[in-house]
Every structure is written in structure tokens, then in C-alpha cells.
Amino acid sequence: MARFKRSEYNSILKEDSPYQERGVSDDPTPLFLDSNKGLVMWSGKGDIPEVGDYVSMRVPVPYTGIVVSHFQEYGYVGLRVRPDYDCHDALSQQGYGKLPKVGEDWTKEDLVYNYGCDLTTD
């Protein structure tokens, strides 16, 4: 069973919202029903990838990997991704430390955290 299902609602900032001054887009943000926590915002296009889905990300460098879990910060649901081994060198140069080699154990710190806006849908 999928954890996230698109709702019929979108989130729109009101004109008097304090976030309007920070250059936040007026475009509606899609809301999804989270089977664990109610409504959540998603900053990406399309549906929220589920655990086990293979994704392509663009931040901090282009990389691919598998969604291991989700997290919520600043009202948005995000993705914790275990990057493919051939992406480790490029990610390590961006401050993710020395990522595990093939056959080494993974820890929570080895996952790369991203929001939906970092997901490439090509």
C-alpha cells in the first residue's frame, strides 16, 4: 500500500503571509495524504516516490539512488536516498564525508537528504 496519495487540495500562501516577503512562489503547492501523519506538502512534480523507488536527484550534484525513507521539515516531506556507489566520489567532494564502499555497512549518516524540488523527472 502506498504511503502517500494526492489530495484534492493545494496549499496557497495568503497575501498577508510573512513568507511572501521572502520571495516564496505564489504557485499552489500540492498536498498529499500521508497514511502516517495527515496532510503533507510536496515540493516536487508528480507523486511522492515511495520507499524502494529508484530516483534521480540534482542536488548537491546529479546522482541516482534508492529511497530508503521519508522525513518532514519546514512542512514539506523529503526523501532520504541511498546513492549508487558510482556517485559516492562526487558526493563525498560535496561534504558528505567518505561514503561506504561496496560491501561496507551503511549508517543513517550515509544517506543524502533531499526535497522534491531536487528530484529530476526526466
Image (tube, grey):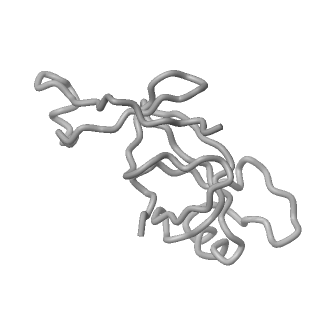
Above or below for 107 versus 29: below
Q: Position of residue 4 (x, y in %)?
A: 53, 36
* Rendering quarter of residue 85: bottom right
* Rendering quarter of residue 11: top left
| 26 horizontally vs 94: left or right | left
Q: Quadrant of the C terminus?
A: bottom left
Query: What residue occupies the far left of the structure in this picture?
Result: 15
* Rendering quarter of residue 13: top left
| 121 horizontally vs 29: left or right | right
| 94 horizontally vs 58: left or right | right
Q: Position of residue 67 (x, y in %)?
A: 64, 53
- Residue name at image x 39 percent, y 31 percent: 7
Q: Position of residue 114 (x, y in %)?
A: 51, 51
- Residue name at image x 86 percent, y 58 percent: 105
Marks counted in the figure total: 0
Above or below for 41 versus 69: above
Q: Position of residue 34 (x, y in %)?
A: 53, 29
- Residue name at image x 20 percent, y 25 percent: 18
Q: Quadrant of the N terminus?
A: top right
| 93 horizontally vs 21: left or right | right
Above or below for 100 versus 52: below
Foreground of the two, 57 or 96: 57
